[in-house]
Image (tube, rainbow, N blue to C red):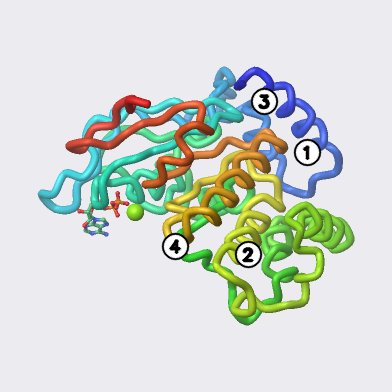
Amino acid sequence: MVRERAHIMEEVRTERKGGSPVPSRILASNEVRARSFGSSGEFMQARELHVRLAKVSKAYDSHVVLADIDLEVRPGEFVVIVGRSGSGKSTLLNLIAGLDFPSSGEIQLLGQSLTELTEEQRAKLRCHSLGFVFQFFNLIPTLTVAENIRLPMALNGIAKNEAKSRTNTLLHDLAMAECGQRFPEELSGGEQQRIAIARAMAHRPAVVLADEPTGNLDLETARDVLELLDQTCRGQGTTLIMATHSREVIGLADRVLTIRDSHLQEAER
Ligand code: ADP
Ligand code: MG
């Protein structure tokens, strides 16, 4: 399954090379030719990993949430993280996104060590290379559906015509072609989450992080949304890391991990 995706990745990379306006440093990171930001300024050997955590621990004061976490995620993989409420799933995703910092250990996103980047470099990397899907959709209520989808593309400097055309294609693929000019509050929860998936994918990020994306949906809608997210990521060769309670997703994932007593381990399937 992963191998099939590697093939798709190659096509996506080829497409990304064509006229992308993003800074070459970040473009290179998406091609997994990661540049080290170490003091030597030398290019380091490319690492074929999208996410790498080495001996990562996270504590809030004396409360240890995550301990000694090692994790390697390859391009195009679909990794699910399960664990009871409060076990540290969101904390782990926030660390991977560089929105929070480990108490110890190292985290690399697309071969770049997050702690070695400046805040501005982390923000650029996040903006270009990550897509997010949240439990409560987090669409901007004052923007139309089409404007919500176009926003990350605008932030990445993608030309207006290209952004419009991608938005129309995504809306069509989601069977929501008629909804572009509507506002999020006029849509059902399932429809809002489909739009949030389109927004997360429109700028073709290397990695999508989804935090309980079906936590606010009924079972049937949840199933549709999971399939859509899985198919869209596979279609674009995107790495998907999802925290969820949903058992439905386990059959779709390449790997299922669980957080128990602050440790990350392979889950029984
Ligand atoms: P999950 O997503 O698995 O439900 P979280 O990652 O949200 O779990 O939280 C894990 C633990 O870390 C919880 O005990 C929570 O209270 C604690 N926690 C999360 N964020 C903070 C914070 N900013 N300050 C203090 N404690 C926090
Ligand atoms: Mg959470």
Q: Which residue is under mark 1?
A: 16
Q: Earlier in the sequence, mark 4 or mark 2?
A: 2
Of badges 3 and 4, nearer the viewer stands 4
Which sits in the foreground, 248 or 245? 248
Residue at numbered disc 4: 216
- Which quarter of the frame holds ligand 1? bottom left
Residue at 19% in and 52% down? 60
Do the residues bearing badges 1 and 3 touch, measured as CB atoms within 8 Å?
Answer: no
For residue 77, side relative to residue 264 (left or right):
right
| Disc 2 packing (10 Å; few <14; some 14–19; many ≥20) | some
**Where does residue 144 sit, x and y in percent of width and height?**
70, 76
Residue displayed at 60% across by 66% down? 192
Q: Which mark is residue 191?
A: 2
Report if residue 146 is visible in the image.
yes
Distance from disc 2 to disc 3, alpha carbons, whole Å, reads 27 Å
Whether ligand 2 has any atom under 8 Å from the Cβ at mark 3 is answered as no
